[in-house]
Structure formats: C-alpha cells, structure tokens
Amino acid sequence: MKTKLMSLLILITVLMTLKFKFYPSLSGISLEGVQKVNELPSPDNHYKLNIYLYGGVLLKWDYSYIAELEDLTNYKKKNILWLPPELPEIRWLDDNTLLVNEEEVNITKDTFDFRWD
C-alpha cells in the first residue's frame, strides 16, 4: 500500500513539473529578446498593446503570439493575451476593451489564453 501511494505521489509530482515547464502561465512569460511584430495604441493613448512572436513551448516551430499591455503613464507592463499561430484580428473597442476574434477582453481585469479559452 505504501509503495502504491509513494508511486502515485511521485507520478503527480512529475506530471505537475512537466505542466509548469511546458505550459507556463501567461504572467510567467518573459518577453526579453523576443521579436515585437506590432503595437496598437489605445484610443486615448493611455495604453499600448505590444504584440510579440513567441517561440513554441514544446518546439521552436510551434510558435504563438503574446500581447503585452503597457501603461504609458507609469510604464508598467503585463501580459494579457496569448494568441494562436494564426494571429487573430485585434482592435480596441474603447479605452479599456479589446476585441479579439469576436471576444471582448477588458484590459483591467481579463486575460485571454487561446490554449484554455
């Protein structure tokens, strides 16, 4: 019984480690040295959405895009969108809302991750 329980705990630990290594969270992605492909200023120029080409999680050809929101008043940045390889249409609806392929994203409280959404 103890052997089965220990084996189960080791298996769970290994699986969780693999999940965090190969499927990082959106906020845990560093965009240093990553190629910027576009930027979209908000209608009031308070924010700027920087879009980066992000190398694949598992393989380098398995690429996607990460969109980083930059507050132009205090220069704080946060990742809010993880987008698929087929870069969707992104546009500002108003000063705080983006439209990403027919889905509204409130930049003050929402994120979008194509892997889960």
Image (cartoon, rainbow, N blue to C red):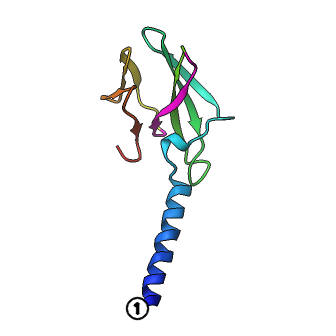
Q: Is residue 17 left or right of residue 60?
A: left
Residue 104 falls in which quadrant of the image? top left
Q: Is residue 80 magenta?
A: yes
| Residue 82 coordinates in the image, percent (x, y) | 47, 38
Q: Is residue 13 above or below residue 71?
A: below
| Residue 30 coordinates in the image, percent (x, y) | 61, 39
Q: Quadrant of the N terminus?
A: bottom left
Pick the residue in front: 48 or 84. 48
Residue shown at the point (57%, 42%) measured from the top left? 29
Amino acid at the residue labelled 1? Met
Bounds of the magenta segment: 74-85
Q: Is residue 54 left or right of residue 93?
A: right
Query: Which residue is outermost to the top?
Result: 44
| Residue 3 coordinates in the image, percent (x, y) | 47, 89
Q: Quadrant of the C terminus?
A: top left
Q: Is residue 110 left or right of residue 75?
A: left
Residue shown at the point (54%, 63%) measured from the top left? 17
Residue shown at the point (49%, 46%) measured from the top left? 25
Q: Is residue 78 magenta?
A: yes
Pick the residue in front: 94 or 108. 108
Pick the residue in front: 75 or 88. 75
Q: Which residue is mark 1?
A: 1
Residue shown at the point (41%, 24%) measured from the top left? 90
For mark 1, give the secondary structure: loop
